[in-house]
Amino acid sequence: MELRRVPVETAITVVVILTVLAGTVTMAALRQEVTPNVWDYTMPPVACAAAVFRRRFPISALLLAGAAAGFYYPLANLDGWILLAVLLTLFTAADLGHLAAAATITVAGLLAVTLGEMNSPIRHLDDSQFLLLGGWVFATLAMGGMSRNRRAYLAEAGRRLAEAERTREEEARRRAAEERLRIARELHDTLGHNISMINVQAGAALHRIKDRPGQAETALATIKEASKEALRELRATLGVLRQVDEDSPTGPAPSLARIRELADRIGLAVRIEILGEPRALPAEVDHAAVRIIQEALTNVTRHSGAGAAEVVIRYGDADLTLRIDDHGPGAWPRSETGFGIIGMRERATALGGSLEAGDRHTGGFRVSARLPLRGIS
């Protein structure tokens, strides 16, 4: 923008200077009955010089051009066009933000011209011309102020547009990060739960394959079912990544309505207690609750050494609470390098709830979660 303005302003400056100087020569040629004096030939170049430096020294240039005009009109003999240089410096001063100073100098200049005309032997301006001069001067002042306001408006609009663009980019990055975390949790919970189940059942099958082939066959059937479920959920998650949800495998989504079926495949003796009246839950809450229970039970098989666990699901008016207990002698990992407890806590807090995990006083480990129902659509 500035690169385009410089040549235009330079051209305007050159045109004004040439017009003012040519006006002096033209008036001298046309009015041969009038003898030009030193003021006719010195004041126009002074005003033109002020116009050249008006952007670097706007107030000084306006004062110099105004002083030149103040001397010119009462003392010069020709009616030249020095006013053009004055108007140009006046416009520039207002355009650069010196509106109050420009207005003060303008009023003082008009008073000086009035006094000069009253005391001059030659009347350069009659009443109508003086009113026209005042109109041009104040119109130039107003246009300079409007030009500055317009430029400030465009700059502010550009700033807001850039800020909006930056905000959109930050929001897009934030949502992308949240989506990556969500997908990471899904993959961790899906693969971790099912692979842990497969590992437990495979160990049981190997242990019983000779002595109790019937139980080994049951364990292998559970492995088959778990691997099928893991593949289905993995394909569904990858389908989201590829944005081809319509082509993703369909199947029953994890839900508390199927929690007994899911718990039976864990490889633990899981006792499930449901308090309150079971009812349809918001999809986010239902999904998070299943994943938290799955992850907690998976961690029981991995770390606690317990052969049984208890799951308590309480349907409240405003929230859903979960409690998963085990009585194993082992200790869950406390390091934050693991993602099991972190993922469960992220699921709860993402819905405005909370999750606590720690040792029980009577032995074993407990995971407690609260998932609010109100405000979830």
Image (spheres, rainbow, N blue to C red):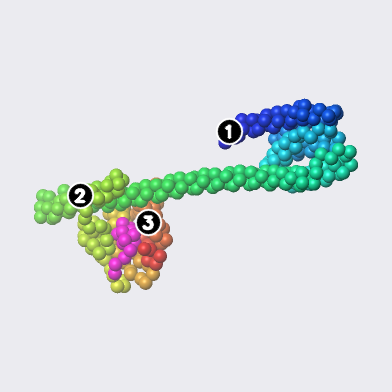
Residue at (71% x, 30% y) in the render:
19
SS label for mark 1: helix
Residue at (16% x, 48% y) in the render:
206
Residue 202 seen in the figure:
yes
Crowding at dot 3, Cα within 10 Å, few <14 / some 14-19 / many 20+, comes out as many
Front residue (pair 262, 160): 160
Q: Which residue is mark 3?
A: 347
* Identity of the residue furthest to the front in this view: 33
Q: Position of residue 154 (x, y in %)?
A: 57, 45
Q: CA distance from mark 1 to mark 2?
A: 68 Å
129 relative to 220 in the view: left or right: right
On whether residue 286 falls in the magenta region, the answer is yes
Q: CA distance from mark 3 to mark 2?
A: 24 Å
Residue at (46% x, 47% y) in the render:
168
Up the image or down, 266 lies above or below 67; here it is below
Please count the marks in the image.
3
Front residue (pair 233, 337): 233
Q: Amino acid at mark 2?
A: Ser
Q: Position of residue 113 (x, y in %)?
A: 82, 42
Disc ID at residue 135: none
Residue at (18% x, 53% y) in the render:
225
Please report the bounds of the magenta region as a residue range: 279-293
Disc ID at residue 4: 1
Q: Amino acid at mark 3?
A: Arg
Q: Amino acid at mark 1?
A: Arg
Q: Which residue is mark 2?
A: 227
Is most of the magenta stretch helix, strand or loop? helix
58 relative to 248 in the view: left or right: right
Q: Earlier in the sequence, mark 1 or mark 2?
A: 1
